[in-house]
Amino acid sequence: MLDKTFDPKAAEPRLYATWEECGVFAPRQDTAAETYSIVIPPPNVTGSLHIGHALNNTLQDILARYHRMTGKAVLWLPGTDHAGIATQMVVERQLAADGNMSRREMGRDAFVDKVWEWKATSAGSIQQQLRRLGASCDWSRERFTLDPDLQVAVRKVFVRLHKEGLIYRDKRLVNWDPHFQTAISDLEVEQREMDGFYWHFAYPLADGVTYEHPVAWDGDGQPTGHETRDYIVVATTRPETMLGDTGVAVHPDDPRYAGLVGKFVTLPITGRRIPIVADAYADPTKGSGAVKITPAHDFNDFQVGKRAGLAALNVMEPSAASPPPTRPTCPPTTRAWTASPPARPSSPGRRRRAGSRRSRRPVTSSRTATARAWSSSRG
């Protein structure tokens, strides 16, 4: 006797198991038949499938079943992806939530065993989800991206691409997690917008260079007054990365700094010579129009550094803290502002508290100015 209502939970698993036992999802053994194949985009073994996977796999299933009914030898190849960085994060978070030892405390081999345990759990869950969807995959050919023969194939392709000059190896910026002490993917990063503040620092020009900087303009925006400067004012929202600066960028069409491109400045605190480069990344309408470039600590700066050939200096430890300070040798003419730069520099003997309403005049000690500016930003 038929039930009054259809119960898919009882019928679908039974029907699917019958299909698998009969081998109806395997390609037909007819050498004359036209072939058709789909390699399933392997889901990451970081958890379970979501609604996006359901839609994507349903469309693939429709194609596989349609071509199977036209008489083609169809292979829909299932598999999962190791997703190393993301999976590591999942396992480490699970260990922390369960109160277990960290990755470093348990050692590499023990941690790898934990990752393989998680892979078995997650992959098994993904397989069952696909089966419940009715996906007509050939499960006898299921693959995992770390299967030995697949690793050989991947290495072979990478070597060939490298020899053909289509891929290269280089240093790149990564998203670093100071807690788990590992790089993480862009998908694992939560972007947050925060209110910032512009700090203005006077980087002294090297080699005795000076230039005429506009300080007054007419109604049409044309400069009518200039002053001679032996420094360039750099505006930044990240003064804490100053030690990693390897360049200063100005816009190539900014007439204020056209004569300074190719010249050098003396980096405050360190006394290191760094070049002034022209790059469209610098926005003449923001800050002072001149920006410090720290290639090792900002993705935009990294690209500017690549274009200009600037070095990337890492000034942070794996814990994301700056290294312990050493006593710096400070150039005596370094100046810093916490707001808009002044029209004219003050006399060397006068100092005002950074961050106050009257702090638009420069202070002459880079060490004092920088320290006060940082404490003001935290306050």
Image (spheres, rainbow, N blue to C red):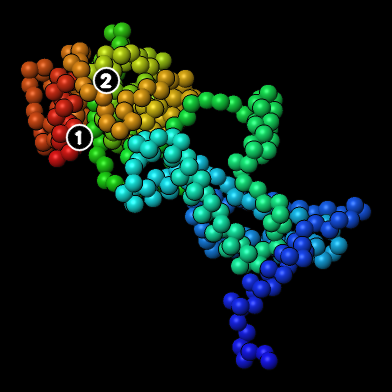
The disc, 1 or 2, on the residue closer to the chain's N-terminal end is 2
Residue placed under numbered mark 2 in the picture: 203
Name which residue lies at 73% across and 65% down. Answer: 21
Q: Position of residue 185 (x, y in %)?
A: 46, 42
Among all residues in the image, which is located at the extreme top?
A: 207
Q: Residue furthest right?
A: 32
Q: Are marks 1 and 2 in contact (CB under 8 Å)?
A: no
- Which quadrant is the N terminus positioned in? bottom right
Residue 347 visible from this viewpoint: yes
Residue found 77% across the figure and 62% down from its top: 23
Quadrant of res 157? top right
187 vs 58, left or right, is: left
Residue 272 drawn at (x, y percent): 31, 14
Q: Which residue is mark 1?
A: 339
Residue 196 in the image, given as x and y percentages of width and height: 26, 42
Residue 229 makes an appearance in the image: no
Which sits in the foreground, 71 or 1? Answer: 1
Q: Is residue 102 left or right of residue 304?
A: left
- Badge 2 density bin: few <14, some 14–19, many ≥20, Cα 10 Å: many
